[in-house]
Amino acid sequence: MTPVSNEKHLWVSWDDYHRSVEKLALMVYESGWKFDQVLCLARGGLRPGDIMSRIFDVPLGILSTSSYRAEAGTVQGELDIAKYITITKGTLSGKVLLVDDLVDSGVTLEKVQQHLREHYPAVTEVKSAVIWCKACSVVRPDFYLQYLETNPWIHQPFEEYDGLRPHQLAAWIKKG
């Protein structure tokens, strides 16, 4: 059972998570903006990016970024951006939908957009899409489903795997 959310914590179930990604995809569709590729920011943008790529039937690119490493992923550190983008069809070019799960400080979104401008001249336009946009962000994504005025910590359903290790799987599965 998903705990009750409050102004400091937003608890998200798997069903809520998937509906949110679908609603975000609908928002992008209804905007009328057409794009050639989806670029997701791993890890948080992997699931939304995959779903968007499937719904819009466009290639999926993956760019790994990381800033939350300390304190079991709860403290933001320096941003690392991978040197290469993985994409199965050609290279990143044209109009790109940049997808992540959320924008917190906005630093990742801002720096990745700068990275794309500097290293991918074939990209002609970038628009960003996230499920959650926190008020403390220095940038606003082009598309976001929820604006979070109180900047809560978002507890996403897949975080239950963060503390799970292979030797614990049998007991975890048995427990249900």
Image (cartoon, rainbow, N blue to C red):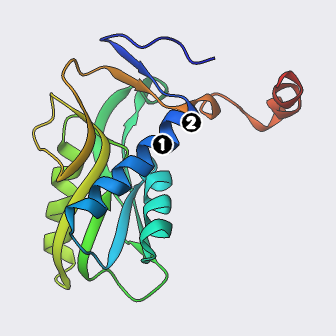
Rendered residue at 50%/34% (across/down): 16
Residue 153, quarter of picture: top left
The residue located at (15%, 28%) in the rendering is 136
Position of residue 105 relative to residue 63, above or below, is: above
Residue found 14% across the figure and 72% down from its top: 118
Badge 2 is on which residue? 15
Horizontal side of residue 57 vs 176, given as left or right:
left
Q: Nearer the viewer, residue 55 or 151?
A: 55
| Neighbour tally class for label 1: few under 14, some 14-19, many 20 plus, Cα within 10 Å | few
* Residue 44 on image: x %, y %: 43, 46
Q: Quick check: 98 above or below 172?
A: below
Residue identified by numbered label 1: 19
Quarter of the figure that contains the C terminus: top right
Q: Secondary structure at mark 1?
A: helix
Q: Residue 130 location, x and y as percent?
A: 30, 47
Q: Is residue 114 above or below residue 158?
A: below
